[in-house]
Amino acid sequence: MITLQKLPYISVIVPAYNSEKTIRDCIDSLLNQSYPRNSYEIIAVDNNSSDNTQEIIKEYPVRYVEEKNTRSSYTSRNAGIENSFGQIIGFIDADAKADKDWISKAVETILTNKVDYLGGNIVVYSDSGKSNSFDFYSRYYEFQAEKFLKWYHYAPTCSLFVKRETFKKVGKFLSGLSSGGDYEFGNRVYRASLKQVYSQDVVVYHPSRTNLSSQVKKWLRVGGGAAELFFHDAGRYKGLISRLFNPRNYLPPNPWSFAKDIKIQNINNLRDRVSLYFLLYTAKNIRNLGGIYKLAKMSITR
């Protein structure tokens, strides 16, 4: 266990864009941490919202930062880093809620295991209280932080802690990306041979998307982010683009692999299985479409 004398100062950064419906719950959860309140700061970064996000943030005892020049959550996170004082910097999304021991468990893990980059557990829940295909998709395919860290060397930025020294060694997030900045940054940390760890005990609660429209926007953004990474470093990320022109990448998911997945996930309802299979196939093709569109757009404007 960590002792009071050894507690490092923590900065928690919350990038927000049009988050008036969720930002209160997020900040409330951060203000009610078991970690001593005088040992951490909360920095909310408004990314030029057009709703009441800015006004709501200013109601709370948190630091307020604006990022008006570039619409990007990664640029907003960088603005937060630049205005922070913590030895360890935590990141959470404006629509997520932190467990009361989120900071304490992260600090304990980092200090005990000499960690440079810590990915946390993301518990997906449905606002309606009922699980549906979108809930299953988010839970098993979007927020698998442990799997992502093990196989792809990154954790989603909705539950992430990074030592300030790590940013000094590898740099901040790649500014301007619409998606994929967590992947790009995590792999820079990995290539620098810094220690990356996942902790099941460092928990945030994240809502699943509730409709196809919001999910499609996310898939298009993810596909576009792959194209942006390619233009940033064509040699390193050419694989993200070459698959767009591979006909096999447009085939439905392998049914045998899918059957294995749903068995592990204990999804027994036939309708949920069919819906989830449809979502997986739709997701892949819409991500491809987003990548092709962004690739064409950036090729024209460059």
Image (cartoon, grey):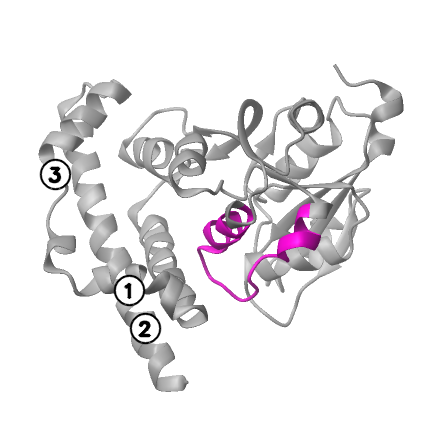
Is there a contact, CB below 8 Å, between mark 2 and mark 1?
Answer: yes
Q: Quadrant of residue 231?
A: bottom left
Mark 3 lies on residue: 254
Q: Which residue is mark 2?
A: 295
Relative to 250, does residue 271 appear above or below in the rendering?
above
Decide: is 70 above or below 10.
Answer: below
Q: Residue furthest front?
A: 193
- Neighbour class for label 2 at 10 Å: few (<14), some, many (≥20)? many
**Residue toward you, 73 or 167:** 167
Mark 1 — residue?
241
Residue 203 vs residue 110, the one in the foreground: 110
- Residue type at mark 2 is Leu
**Nearest to N terminus: mark 2 or mark 3:** 3
Q: Residue at x 58, y 36 (%)?
A: 195
Q: Secondary structure at mark 1?
A: helix
How many labels were placed on the picture?
3
Q: Residue furthest top?
A: 1
Q: Quadrant of the N terminus?
A: top right
Q: Reading the chain from its start, which is encountered first: label 3 or label 1?
A: 1
Disc 1 marks a residue whose amino acid type is Ile
Find residue 150 and report its horizontal and vertical position in percent: 42, 34
Residue 65, quarter of picture: bottom right
Look at the image and give the residue range highlighted in magenta: 166-189
Q: What residue is drawn where x is 10% and y is 59%?
A: 247
Q: CA distance from mark 2 to mark 1?
A: 8 Å
